[in-house]
Structure formats: structure tokens, C-alpha cells
């Protein structure tokens, strides 16, 4: 059985893109592997959240993943900061991480451009913290998106360097987890790109029906087709892509026929799409609200997850300390 580790961003709420992009696969994956899912609250400190925002975001995301089907009886679900072995391994890995390779990291260079007044050490050493998150459980598989592939390669570098430096075969060099299928890319409502928090084009799983209707009715469209069977421009194709994942096949076929016949009314299509999104997200929204209101349950799940994660992490860090030479007299 594979050991799989995946970090969950602690900033922002989950949206339809998160759900159809990876979360559905996480729910399935937990029954086929030994999975560790963690809320990456240490990572969020690079953007300096307030204490209230940090705590609230972690609680929100924790509840949302539980509501969507992550099972704490099957997988290990925990908060990163509840496992002190992670920052210890992060420190040890930093001792053998070189400035040049960290500065060449694409995500670091992107942050320098976008946040020139906040180029902190946490951003520079982000890859070593990510590596510590992964190899603290000696994971051999990691589900990653395209934007994280370089970080995974650096994790392999740090794990391999540790093994060579101390002449051991201790850390596996993890590879990307292949879900065995093409991940669904959910577009945003602004006519281009993918759905995302920073783009301001997302529909969140916790959105109220009124908010969803308002967002969908503002989705970008055009003047309509002028010829039968005309190719759909990107904003219109985006609406059909959304409809494909939340609506019935008959509904999609109906509006496709209207489009190809040049008689489609985008207002009608968006009204139908909004109602279908609401029908899909409302059960999730209600579960999220129920879990968020049950603080005792959340606390018990987080404590049990931390206990399970520390069982694994403490074994690793004990062996690492011994390999490096930290031993009692």
C-alpha cells in the first residue's frame, strides 16, 4: 500500500474547481492508500494573516473537507502546526538546502515579482517546509498540480541528498500520484482561465443560493451565435463545461441544441445553471454549516488526527536524529 501525503491550503474556502479538480479523487484515494491530509497553516504565515483570520480559515477548511467526504476513521486528517516534528525536520533539511537552488524556484521568483515588499525567509524556504511535510511520513506518492511539480522535484532532491550525505537508504523519493484519469478543469465565471479565489471568479461550496444566482447571472457571455453549429467562444464553452458537471445530460443537450440552432437565450441558460449548481452544492453547504457548529466534534477529529500524525512523525524524527548524530550521552 502506498503512503500518500497531501497538503491543503488553509486560506480561503473550497470552490467547485477544488471539488472537481482533486477533492473527489482524495475521497476515493483514502480507501486505496495510507493517506495523510493536513491543513497547511504554517505555510500561510508567509502572507501574515491575523490570528483571527488564521484560526477561522483553518477551522473552515477543516470542516469543508470533512463535509466533502474525507473520513477521519480511514485517513489521517490533521493541522500542520499540531505536529512539532514537522518544523524540526524543516530546520534539519534547511541545513543542507542551498541558497542558489532555493532562489531558482519558479514560485519564489513569481512571489518576488508579485510581492516585492514581502520577500521573507519563509517564501525562500517554502520548498524545504513542503519537503518536510511529505517525507516526515516517508511518503512515496504525492498528488500535485502543475504549479507544484517543481516543489515535488525539490523534495526528491532533499530526500536523496539526505540519504547520500549520511550514507543511508532512509527517505523514499516520492513521485506524483496519478489518479488514473484526466482531472476536470473547472473554468471561472469571468470568461477565461480556471476557477480560483485570487481571480475572483469562483463559486464556493459554502455559498448561499442567493449568492450563487447573483454570480452566475453576471457570468460573461456574448451576443449569441450567428450561424448554425458555430464553434463556441471560450466564455460560452465555459458555461457549458460547468453545466456538464452539475446538470443532467438532457439539460446540456437541450441548450446545445438551442445554441446550434442560433436561438439560445443565455439568460435562461444561466438561470438553469444556477439552479443546478445550487442543487449540487446545497447538501454540501448544509453539512459544512452543521460541522462548523459542532466545535466538540471538530476538536476531537483534530486531536485524533494530530495523535495519529505524530505517531508516524515521531518515529521518523527519532531515526533522523540518530542518523545525524543527535544521541544522548
Image (cartoon, rainbow, N blue to C red):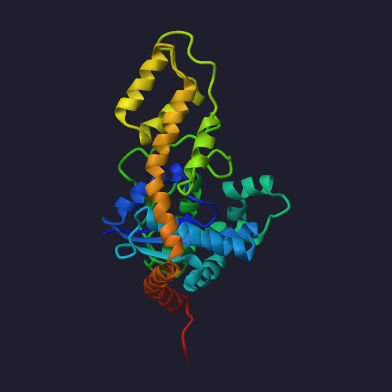
Nearer to us in this view, 156 or 281: 281
Q: Within the image, what quadrant is residue 320 found in?
A: bottom left
Nearer to us in this view, 159 or 186: 186
Q: Where does the image place residue 141, in percent across and percent down from the top left?
A: 36, 55
Residue at the limit of the structure toward the right, as seen here: 117
Residue in the image at 44% along x and 46% along y: 18
Q: Is residue 323 above or below residue 205?
A: below
| Viewport quadrant of the N terminus | bottom left
Residue at the limit of the structure toward the bottom, as seen here: 329
Q: Horizontal placement of 54 versus 4: left or right?
A: right
Residue at the limit of the structure toward the top, as seen here: 227
Q: Is residue 174 visible?
A: no
Q: Where does the image place residue 56, in percent across and percent down from the top left?
A: 55, 61
Q: Is residue 293 visible?
A: yes
Q: Horizontal placement of 281 versus 211: left or right?
A: left
Nearer to us in this view, 82 or 284: 284
Residue in the image at 49% along x and 81% along y: 326
Total label count?
0
Nearer to us in this view, 149 or 96: 149
Q: Is residue 155 above or below residue 237?
A: below
Q: Where does the image place residue 118, in percent across and percent down from the top left?
A: 70, 55
Q: Where does the image place residue 20, in percent across and percent down from the top left?
A: 39, 42
Amino acid at each position: 500500500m502506498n503512503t500518500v501525503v497531501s497538503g491543503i491550503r488553509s486560506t480561503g474556502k473550497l470552490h467547485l474547481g477544488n471539488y472537481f479538480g482533486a477533492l473527489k479523487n482524495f475521497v476515493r484515494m483514502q480507501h486505496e492508500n495510507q493517506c495523510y491530509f493536513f491543513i497547511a497553516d504554517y505555510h500561510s504565515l508567509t502572507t501574515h494573516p491575523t490570528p483571527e483570520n488564521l484560526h477561522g480559515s483553518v477551522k473552515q477548511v477543516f470542516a469543508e473537507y470533512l463535509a466533502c467526504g474525507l473520513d477521519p476513521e480511514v485517513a489521517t486528517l490533521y493541522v500542520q502546526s499540531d505536529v512539532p516534528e514537522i518544523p524540526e525536520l524543516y530546520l534539519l533539511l534547511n541545513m543542507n538546502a542551498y541558497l542558489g537552488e532555493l532562489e531558482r524556484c519558479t514560485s519564489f521568483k513569481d512571489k518576488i515579482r508579485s510581492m516585492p515588499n514581502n520577500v521573507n525567509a519563509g517564501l525562500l524556504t517554502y520548498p524545504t517546509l513542503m519537503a518536510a511535510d511529505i517525507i516526515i511520513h516517508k511518503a512515496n506518492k504525492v498528488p500535485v498540480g502543475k504549479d507544484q511539480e517543481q516543489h515535488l522535484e525539490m523534495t526528491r532532491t532533499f530526500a536523496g541528498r539526505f540519504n547520500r550525505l549520511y550514507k543511508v537508504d532512509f527517505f523514499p523519493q516520492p513521485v506524483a500520484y496519478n489518479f488514473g484519469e484526466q482531472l476536470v478543469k473547472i473554468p471561472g465565471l469571468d470568461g477565461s482561465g480556471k476557477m480560483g479565489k485570487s481571480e475572483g471568479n469562483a463559486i464556493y461550496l459554502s455559498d448561499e443560493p442567493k449568492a450563487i444566482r447573483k454570480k452566475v447571472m453576471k457570468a460573461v457571455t456574448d451576443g449569441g451565435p450567428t450561424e448554425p453549429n458555430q464553434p463556441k467562444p471560450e466564455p460560452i464553452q465555459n458555461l457549458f463545461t460547468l453545466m456538464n458537471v452539475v446538470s443532467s445530460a438532457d439539460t446540456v443537450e437541450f441548450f446545445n441544441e438551442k445554441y446550434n440552432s442560433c436561438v439560445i437565450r443565455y439568460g435562461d441558460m444561466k438561470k438553469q445553471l444556477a439552479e443546478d449548481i445550487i442543487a449540487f452544492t446545497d447538501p454540501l453547504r448544509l453539512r459544512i454549516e452543521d460541522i462548523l457548529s459542532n466545535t466538540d466534534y471538530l476538536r476531537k477529529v483534530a486531536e485524533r488526527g494530530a495523535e495519529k500524525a505524530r505517531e508516524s512523525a515521531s518515529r521518523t524524527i527519532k531515526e533522523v536524529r540518530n542518523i545525524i548524530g543527535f544521541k544522548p550521552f
